[in-house]
């Protein structure tokens, strides 16, 4: 059901991990629907994204879209990174099955959330960036106890 | 892929070679229509009769109480829709459970659209139907109770005898979807007070496309498939003779081997459970510890989602299934796992492994070994695991 590129990014995900003292961190999605993405960005003084890392809880497509999204934003300025839309991520992966399109939306949203965090920390305004809508903290559930 | 380790026997099974052998003559040699008059059809008639007899005997029924259908889903649809139709003058209330297979649940939803009322009785944390709640739900207009014999996901076996007793005490019909339980555990329609029972061929090493419905004599349900006079005018359509023969053969084999096979498979299943819980942290077994189908193991692994697990298991040659949203085709994880009280986040990380008599100890060792690595790898990518580790360090 997945393209070769999706399978490649699922099997060999690029940029898995964390960035300590990241310039911006964004976490989107919720456990209820089964997808959570967290993206870390390291941004230099010229507003260029030097590095990006991700962690994802979700299906094959969720992992692949996070991996591709991080790959697409590295080396771009924050303004350019805004152009990395869900469509761009999907195209770069040679498409996604219709039921998995929401994963690419989540990847776009995760980038935006990380950029928003960066903008807030540095008290700057990134033109065209709106406050991300979905956030994990709104949906956080009680942890199960019987483990 | 070199070797396939098939651990999805709750989805379907490999047909026994003896079953295939028994079926073959009825495709090309004794292909006569059992409903025909001439003697050329006698072998086909005889074969259908013998299969019916084998199956009837197996569940303590009479021959004329066994009806052949196109499968388990058809049997469930027939039982519920036809009983609703036949008894609507008495009432329009049906009772079922929250963990039924979709063949029952979606039929109930359809019946609700037709003006019937359905009560969905809850289950406890092991997946056992709450009997007091079931009895309390019975009303003067209740016509049918439909509770599955054993659950397809978590394997929990229901107290059928007690459920049947409650139903009969209140004069209500009792149907059981026994698709997973039939020929895996002993079932007796009289001892268990069952009025209607659905079963399927391909879950018991028989062919696909054949099912059975047991209808107790005296139950008034009518035809659901209209046409010829087959099956005592209750299920029209030319008999699927090879399928019927195959199902009969599979039941014949089960009646000889079920007890011993069940013990052996359950032994291996217990070893699997023990190994998984020992070697994989933050894992839990879903379903009742002992009161479960011999071949079923169902786990949840925290911090990961099921689809990734299935893809990686597939790459290791292991066939399994999951109750995650991605595999259920909706945004919600399995309704069964939610019904036993698991939070969404944990239900997404479920894995069902269902064994057969062909499963070996080596298969289990290989699977647990691969699984442990897969889960570790997915957790290393998981933000939920990252948060958990930070919180507890």
Image (spheres, rainbow, N blue to C red):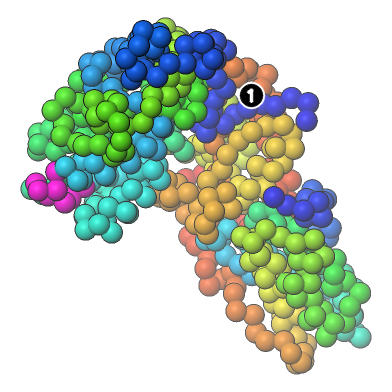
Using the image as rendered, state which of residue B269 and residue B141 is in the foreground. B141
Relative to A13, residue B212 above or below: above
Regarding residue A113, the answer to whether it shows in the image is yes
Q: Residue at x 37, y 37 (%)?
A: B74
Residue under numbered circle 1: B364
* Quadrant where the image shows the N terminus of chain B: top right
Q: Residue at x 57, y 31 (%)?
A: B8
Q: Residue at x 54, y 15 (%)?
A: B28
Using the image as rendered, state which of residue A19 and residue B285 is in the foreground. B285
Chain letter of mark 1 equals: B
Q: Position of residue A23 (x, y in %)?
A: 80, 77
The span shown in magenta is B87-94
Relative to A39, residue B148 above or below: above
Q: Main secondary structure of the magenta part?
A: loop
Decide: few, some or many residues near mark 1? Use Cα within 10 Å; few <14, some 14-19, many ≥20.
many
Residue B91: say if magenta: yes
Relative to B331, residue B210 above or below: above
Horizontal side of B117 relative to B125 (left or right) equals left
Using the image as rendered, state which of residue A104 and residue A134 is in the foreground. A104
Regarding residue A110, the answer to whether it shows in the image is no
Horizontal side of B47 relative to B195 (left or right) equals right
Q: Quadrant of residue A15?
A: bottom right
């Amino acid at each position: 059901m997945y393209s070769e590129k999706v399978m490649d990014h699922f099997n060999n995900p690029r940029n898995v991990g964390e960035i300590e003292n990241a310039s911006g961190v964004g976490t989107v999605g919720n456990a209820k629907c089964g997808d959570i993405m967290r993206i870390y960005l390291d941004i230099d003084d010229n507003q260029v994204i030097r590095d990006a890392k991700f962690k994802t809880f979700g299906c094959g497509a969720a992992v692949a879209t996070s991996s591709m999204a991080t790959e697409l934003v590295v080396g771009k300025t924050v303004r350019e990174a805004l152009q990395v839309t869900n469509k761009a991520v999907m195209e770069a992966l040679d498409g996604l099955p219709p039921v998995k399109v929401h994963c690419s939306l989540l990847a776009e949203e995760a980038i935006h959330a990380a950029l928003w965090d960066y903008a807030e920390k540095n008290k700057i305004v990134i033109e065209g960036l709106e406050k991300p809508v979905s956030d994990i903290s709104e949906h956080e559930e009680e942890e199960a106890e019987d483990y | 892929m070199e070797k396939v380790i098939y651990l999805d026997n709750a989805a379907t099974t490999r047909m026994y070679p003896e079953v295939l052998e028994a079926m073959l003559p009825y495709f090309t040699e004794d292909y006569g229509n059992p409903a025909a008059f001439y003697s050329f059809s006698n072998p086909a008639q005889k074969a259908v009769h013998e299969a019916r007899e084998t199956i009837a005997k197996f569940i303590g029924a009479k021959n004329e109480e066994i009806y052949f259908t196109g499968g388990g889903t058809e049997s469930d649809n027939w039982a519920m829709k036809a009983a609703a139709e036949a008894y609507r003058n008495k009432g329009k209330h049906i009772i079922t459970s929250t963990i039924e297979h979709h063949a029952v649940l979606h039929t109930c939803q359809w019946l609700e659209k037709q003006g019937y009322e359905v009560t969905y009785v809850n289950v406890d944390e092991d997946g056992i139907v709450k009997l007091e709640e079931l009895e309390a739900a019975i009303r003067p207009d209740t016509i049918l109770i439909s509770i599955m014999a054993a659950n397809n996901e978590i394997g929990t076996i229901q107290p059928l005898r007690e459920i049947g007793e409650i139903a009969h005490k209140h004069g209500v019909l009792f149907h059981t979807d026994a698709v997973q339980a039939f020929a895996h555990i002993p079932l007796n329609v009289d001892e268990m007070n069952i009025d209607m029972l659905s079963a399927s061929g391909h879950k018991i090493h028989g062919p696909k496309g054949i099912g059975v419905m047991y209808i107790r004599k005296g139950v008034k349900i009518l035809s659901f498939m209209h046409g010829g006079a087959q099956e005592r005018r209750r299920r029209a359509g030319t008999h699927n003779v090879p399928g019927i023969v195959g199902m009969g053969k599979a039941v014949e084999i089960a009646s000889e081997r079920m007890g011993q096979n069940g013990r052996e498979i359950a032994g291996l299943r217990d070893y699997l459970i023990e190994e998984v819980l020992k070697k994989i942290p933050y894992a839990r077994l879903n379903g009742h510890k002992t009161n479960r189908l011999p071949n079923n193991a169902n786990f949840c692994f925290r911090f990961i989602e099921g689809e990734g697990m299935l893809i990686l298991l597939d790459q290791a040659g292991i066939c399994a299934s999951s109750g995650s949203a991605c595999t259920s085709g909706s945004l919600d994880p399995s309704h069964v796992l939610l019904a036993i009280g698991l939070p969404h986040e944990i239900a997404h990380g479920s894995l069902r492994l269902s064994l057969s008599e062909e499963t070996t100890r080596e298969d289990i060792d290989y699977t647990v070994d691969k699984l442990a690595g897969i889960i570790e790898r997915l957790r290393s990518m998981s933000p939920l695991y990252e948060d958990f580790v930070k919180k507890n360090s």
